[in-house]
Image: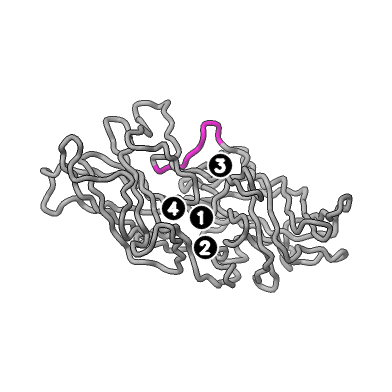
Amino acid sequence: MKRISILLVWAAFLAGGCSDETPFGRISPDGEPRVEVGFRLEAVDTDASIEPMTRATSYKEWFGNSCRLLILKKADTRWIVDATQNVLLDAASGPWLELKLSGDLPPCTFGLELRPGDYRIVAVLNFQSGDWNTELVPGTVVADVADASMRTPPLITYLISTHWMNTGYRQLSREVFVAVADFTVPKSGDLHSSGVPAVTLRAERRVAKFRVLLKDKRSPVNDFSFQKTAHTFRARFISKATPFAEGIDALGGMYYGDSGVYELPWCMSTIGEFYASGTDVYQMCQTNSTVFSPFLFADPRSAGVPFEITDIRISGASGSGGFSYKTGESFTRTLVCNGICGVVFETTDVYDDSSSQLLVDVVGAVDSKGDPEDAAALFDPFYEWNAASY
């Protein structure tokens, strides 16, 4: 497992206007004036420990141009939904634009008018890539510290694909970042001349990346390799001790369902291009793949979730001229938030020709010294964002 090295200045992304899904008027229904509160989203940096063999990064992140806010207000022991808001990341562009970022942007601020009280704000970047819980409307109670039996509902979870290639699979095509902050809004009569101090929001990555690489290395006898065509990878991820996170909950923590998800079928695809790392070339899942889904929700407070990758099948071109691939091996990896893990495959000479399409055995790839290849180290942490333009 490798840590992703990056200085993330997410503050600038919240520059711009708000879309009032729940309007903030200056006077509350009870006649109490609202108070202007400023928010500042600051940079988040991560440790550096990766030394990739190729450094061709241009873009480091892709974001939908709209960040969604869930605003909770505390009433006695309960957290209650007060409002939801959309904030444009680039105020000069439309909400459906995708921002492709190669560097840092200046910090930015935005403001909300709120009634006096205790609040929590949960800001989610790239919420568009998940399934937002539309039942979290104003007045919904999401937590009660006096009621231990009450479970916090999800805020955002995986999308379930309806595409023919991966129907029914969970998928996540963008990195989800979340910022959480608690703050108090005083009554207007209690304000000092300087007003309410700005609330600091620190966005953090809530996903890990799973990278599949298909190595073009010819088998010694039958000259098998991965063909220059798109391939679809399907496997089952199994955790025996700790459940996989299913999303983000309404308090801004990780969401786990009642029974927990310990088996996670997964699907992703490549295109026909190979990319060089050192003296070898590889296919990968990239942004213009039919199924671009390299991200899994992961808990930043966890040391990682060890899991087994099994039931692996890789399909290539259909028909008598194409190959499919399988392996009886399983691979153990650890899913760590803000990290990369994965598998590099190469073909063998073993095959099954009982049907019209050859079924070729694959194994974990090794380098020239015979050591297992590390999917995280062969390409830089951001290569998937840029592969289509190389």
Residue 255 location (% of width, % of height): 47, 40
Which of label 3 and label 4 is nearer to you? 4
Secondary structure found at label 4: strand
| Quarter that holds the C terminus | bottom right
* Along the line of sight, the residue nearer the viewer: 313 or 242: 313
Number of the label disc, if any, that sits on residue 305: none
* Along the line of sight, the residue nearer the viewer: 8 or 140: 140
Residue designated by label 1: 174
Residue designated by label 2: 49
Which of label 4 and label 2 is nearer to you? 4
Cα separation between marks 2 and 1: 23 Å
Residue 213 location (% of width, % of height): 67, 60
The mark nearer the N terminus, 4 or 2, is 2
Q: Is residue 255 magenta?
A: yes
Secondary structure found at label 1: loop
The mark nearer the N terminus, 2 or 1, is 2
Cα separation between marks 2 and 3: 25 Å
Residue in the picture at 74% in, 68% down:
368
Residue 64 location (% of width, % of height): 44, 57
| Quarter that holds the N terminus | bottom right
Cα separation between marks 3 and 4: 17 Å
Residue designated by label 3: 244
Residue 231 location (% of width, % of height): 70, 58
Residue in the picture at 51% in, 35% down:
257
The mark nearer the N terminus, 1 or 3, is 1
Secondary structure found at label 3: loop
